[in-house]
Image (cartoon, rainbow, N blue to C red):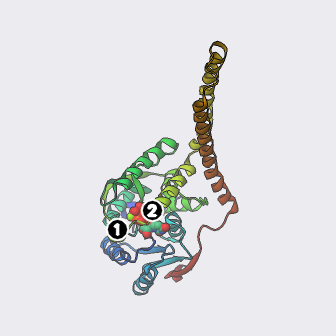
């Protein structure tokens, strides 16, 4: 894609995408802080909130903000579609020369946006924020996240930076590339790595949530990590053949032992324990691998059904572009 302007002196239009699910306690503060940061930058901008089917008063607050402030735009989903889908909708509707993704809970400091833009002016197309420390999150969350990012790195061929969330800046060229990716189970930080371009990281300390509690219970965390792995790796499927080879190797040795016992000793009637161990162990491996297959097949099924990614109930302040 051809550059439209010299970046060093450019005045880019900035779109900030903020997914929100049950964030009535923080959303107004988030908006205020974003406006404060953006006004200081003296750039034209829009704040694009995506209400991901919140059950609390989030939408009422957003509706009011959109009425008072013209740069606040709101997409309201028909139900909860999930964080990654909400971000996708934001990316689809953002009109900026650069698009910034940020969480609604102020764990990602909006002040970092100035650093993002500086890197963008230097010529980078993606600037992502790398978490050096995480404040106010449980030991469980920190250690599972740490483990997940490192495991994912081992399992995939593309380079997905560790300890990096969706808090990032993307140039229009990257956004246009992302929009051509139609897959349903989206792992956005992986997809952004996958598209390539010039990317760099900025370190930061992840703050505590401003208010409310995490909207990522264990169930959503598990689905999210499985989406990440299945989207970018066939490794789990290959485990089946490796486990199969290992267990036939062990089986072969066991046969030799059994034959020896049968021919040279009288101990052959024993062995209920070993039989049960083998049956249970192999049964476990087989069911586990069936589960792995199921995870992939379920996702293939979702792809071929080809339902829309999300449904929008209402939009606010989009008139000028529609
Ligand atoms: N979120 C969303 N839909 C969901 C869950 C979360 O849009 O189904 C949003 C949430 O409002 C927040 C962001 O995704 O802006 C990250 O969620 P959260 O802060 O709860 O995750 P954590 O920081 O605990 O990993
Ligand atoms: Mg959070």
Q: Is ligand 2 within 8 Å of the beta carbon of the residue shown at mark 1?
A: no
Which residue in the rendered view is the most extreme toward the right?
A: 304
Nearer the observer, 176 or 316: 316
In percent of the image, x 41 and y 49: which residue is there? 162
Quick one: label 2 or label 1, which is nearer the N terminus?
A: 1
- Residue 111 appears in view: yes
**Residue 212, above or below 220:** below
Disc 2 to disc 1, C-alpha distance: 18 Å
Which residue is nearer to you in this view: 159 or 247? Answer: 247
Give the quadrant of ligand 1.
bottom left
Task: Find residue 109 and report its horizontal and vertical position in percent.
Answer: 32, 65
Q: Position of residue 94 (x, y in %)?
A: 50, 70
Check disc 2 and report the residue beneath it.
Answer: 217
Q: Is residue 30 above or below residue 66?
A: above
Image quadrant occupied by the C terminus: bottom right
- Residue depth check, mark 2 versus mark 1: number of the one nearer the observer: 2
Q: Quadrant of residue 312?
A: bottom right
Location of the N terminus (image quadrant): bottom right
The answer to whether residue 101 is seen in the rendering is no
Q: How many marks?
A: 2
The residue that mark 1 highlights is 106
Q: Nearer the viewer, residue 158 or 228?
A: 228
Q: Which numbered disc covers residue 240? A: none
């Amino acid at each position: 894609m051809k550059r439209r302007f010299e970046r060093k002196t450019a005045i880019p239009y900035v779109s900030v995408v903020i997914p929100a699910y049950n964030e009535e306690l923080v959303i107004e503060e988030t908006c205020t802080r974003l406006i404060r940061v953006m006004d200081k930058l003296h750039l034209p901008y829009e704040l694009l909130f995506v209400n991901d089917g919140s059950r609390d008063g989030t939408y009422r607050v957003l509706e009011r903000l959109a009425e008072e402030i013209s740069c606040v735009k709101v997409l309201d989903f028909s139900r909860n579609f999930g964080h990654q889908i909400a971000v996708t909708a934001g990316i689809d509707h953002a009109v900026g020369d650069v698009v910034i993704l940020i969480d609604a809970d102020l764990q990602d400091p909006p002040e970092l946006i100035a650093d993002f833009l500086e890197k963008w002016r230097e010529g980078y197309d993606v600037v992502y924020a790398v978490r050096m420390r995480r404040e106010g999150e449980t030991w469980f969350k920190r250690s599972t996240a740490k483990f997940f990012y490192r495991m994912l790195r081992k399992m995939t061929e593309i380079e997905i930076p560790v300890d990096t969330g969706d808090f990032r800046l993307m140039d229009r060229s990257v956004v246009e590339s992302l929009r051509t990716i139609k897959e349903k189970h989206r792992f956005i930080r992986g997809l952004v790595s996958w598209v390539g371009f010039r990317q760099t990281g900025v370190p930061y300390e992840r703050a505590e949530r401003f208010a409310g509690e995490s909207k990522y219970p264990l169930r959503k965390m598990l689905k999210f990590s499985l989406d990440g792995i299945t989207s970018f790796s066939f490794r789990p499927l290959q485990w089946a053949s490796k486990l199969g080879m290992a267990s036939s190797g062990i089986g072969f040795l066991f046969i030799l032992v059994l034959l020896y016992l049968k021919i040279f000793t009288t101990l052959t009637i024993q062995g209920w324990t070993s039989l049960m161990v083998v049956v249970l162990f192999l049964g476990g491996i087989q069911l586990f691998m069936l589960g792995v297959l199921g995870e992939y097949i379920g996702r293939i099924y979702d792809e071929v059904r080809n339902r829309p990614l999300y449904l929008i109930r209402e939009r606010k302040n989009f008139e000028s572009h529609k």
